[in-house]
Image (cartoon, grey):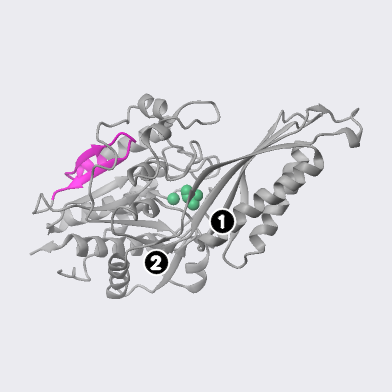
């Protein structure tokens, strides 16, 4: 396998300009982005990505989950392609780089290879996975999960947002439902560049995270039922306060995660209270508990403890409770050959690097089940993400994309 020359570098200014242009689509209210999946803003971002890919001479494939595959031909059309990508959808108060850096970093590789007239044996495919965030339609990494055989397409199409709109209907509405069977594509390898979304690389002063593992995730949606009643005239002992029950359970979530310190984490980011009126005791609370750990047994222990403690809390308060597992995946170990290609690339190019376990979930976590997969991470300021103030430097973006390109091109095999 020919090792790419270390002076093969991307055009950092062009990558940065593309990031800033994409960031203008679906702007947030505080400098970040609100380009949620299958919204009109998502459709505009997709069209811009398609325009750029076609300008780079790629042919665009589209599967039945709306995932986009921009293919740059190799010298051997029968060779399995090397895929590289991430996601363009954002959180409602998302940053400009989460996911987007990985999609546009993949495009930048194709642009650079075109500039330098470099050919590879294997085709290279820049990819935009639909609905990685799972914020509008749970769970996260939905399209890559269907591609990886974890979810059925029928189940995915039936997922509903808070307004009761279905995933399949919204995908058709924005005009981005393709004909390709999901998962029919076979990959030689998959690489994903992503911001760390945590503080470790910045604190350690490293340019590159060589991601060896991804921690596992568990999402349990809990519904507590009490009784709506007047906040003024209902005597305290008679109240069936679902909001209070939720509050006591959320405190228990914190303690359950801390009991597995230092690696386990837990919180609830999605919380709905009904009827959410100032002078009504809430009769219903719906919230999703997000537990994560690199250790699968710890995740299972936290899930079991949650059900035990939450059931005891609502039992004492005379409230009802239901639990629904709405998302989850086991901890993953990425492919050693691909991880080594990332590490050697960082070394070859003189970028400081360290091994890292990904705290966030990524499409690579599901694709790792069907193809050799690895991730490249770059730092982000203060480790902040899923916040409109998410920030990275152009240098960090460039280093990440440089390493990504070296690993991708080495795996796709340069043809002299
Ligand atoms: O939830 C996650 O870890 C990812 O950011 N969707
Ligand atoms: Mn992401
Ligand atoms: Mn995210």
Q: What stretch is highlighted in magenta?
A: 51-73
**Residue 54 among magenta residues:** yes
Q: Does any atom of ligand 1 lie closer than 8 Å to the CB of label 1?
A: no
For label 2, the residue is: 212
Q: Nearer the viewer, residue 382 or 173?
A: 173
Q: Where is residue 236 in the image (x, y as percent from the top left)?
A: 90, 36
Report whether 338 appears left or right of 310: left
Q: Place residue 408 in its image quadrant.
A: bottom left
Q: Eyeballing the image, is 230 above or below 195?
A: above
Please say whether residue 92 is one of the residues in the magenta stretch.
no
Which of label 1 and label 2 is nearer to you?
Answer: 1
Could you say which quadrant of the image residue 209 lies in?
bottom left
84 lies above or below 398: above
Q: How crowded is mark 2: few (under 14 residues within 10 Å), some or many (20 or more)?
A: many
Drawn side of residue 56 relative to residue 33, left or right: left
Q: In this view, does 123 lie to the left or right of 334?
A: left
Residue 32 coordinates in the image, percent (x, y): 50, 45
Above or below, 74 against 162 in this view is below
Report which residue position mark 1 lands on.
300
Element carrying mark 1: helix
In this rendering, the count of numbered labels is 2
Mark 1 Cα-neighbour bin, 10 Å: few <14, some 14–19, many ≥20: some
Q: Position of residue 287 (x, y in %)?
A: 63, 41
| Numbered badge on residue 127 | none
* Residue in the image at 58% along x and 45% along y: 220
């Amino acid at each position: 396998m020919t090792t790419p020359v270390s002076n093969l570098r991307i055009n950092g200014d062009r990558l940065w300009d593309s990031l800033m242009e994409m960031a203008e689509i679906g702007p947030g209210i505080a400098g970040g982005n609100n380009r949620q999946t299958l919204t009109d803003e998502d459709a505009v971002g997709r069209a811009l990505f398609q325009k750029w890919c076609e300008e780079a001479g790629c042919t665009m494939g589209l599967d039945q989950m709306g995932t986009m595959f921009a293919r740059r031909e190799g010298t051997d059309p029968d060779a399995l392609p090397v895929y590289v990508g991430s996601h363009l959808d954002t959180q409602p108060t998302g940053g400009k780089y989460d996911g987007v850096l990985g999609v546009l970093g993949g495009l930048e590789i194709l642009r650079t290879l075109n500039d330098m007239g470099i050919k590879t044996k294997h085709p290279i495919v820049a990819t935009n996975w639909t609905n990685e965030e799972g914020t509008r339609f749970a769970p996260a990494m939905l399209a890559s999960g269907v591609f990886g055989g974890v979810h059925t397409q029928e189940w995915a199409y039936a997922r509903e947002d808070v307004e009761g709109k279905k995933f399949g209907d919204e995908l058709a509405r924005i005009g981005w439902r393709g004909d390709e069977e999901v998962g029919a594509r076979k990959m030689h390898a998959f690489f994903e560049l992503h911001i760390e979304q945590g503080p470790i690389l910045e604190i350690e002063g490293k340019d590159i995270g060589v991601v060896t593992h991804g921690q596992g995730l568990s999402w349990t949606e809990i519904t507590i039922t009490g009784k709506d009643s007047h906040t003024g005239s209902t005597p305290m002992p008679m109240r069936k306060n679902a909001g209070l029950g939720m509050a006591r359970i959320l405190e228990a979530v914190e303690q359950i995660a801390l009991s597995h310190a230092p690696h386990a984490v837990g919180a609830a980011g999605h919380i709905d209270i009904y009827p959410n009126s100032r002078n009504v005791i809430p009769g219903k609370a719906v919230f999703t508990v997000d537990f994560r750990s690199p250790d699968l047994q710890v995740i299972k222990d936290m899930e079991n403890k949650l059900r035990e403690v939450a059931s005891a809390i609502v039992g004492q308060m005379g409230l009802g409770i239901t639990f629904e597992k709405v998302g989850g995946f086991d901890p993953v170990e990425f492919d050693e050959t691909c991880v080594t290609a990332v590490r050697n690339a960082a070394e070859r190019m003189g970028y400081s690097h360290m091994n890292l376990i990904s705290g966030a979930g990524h499409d690579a976590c599901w694709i790792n089940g069907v193809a050799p997969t690895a991730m490249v991470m770059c730092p982000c300021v203060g480790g902040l993400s899923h916040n409109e103030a998410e920030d990275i430097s152009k240098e960090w973006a460039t280093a990440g994309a440089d390493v990504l390109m070296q690993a991708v091109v080495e795996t796709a095999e340069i043809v002299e």
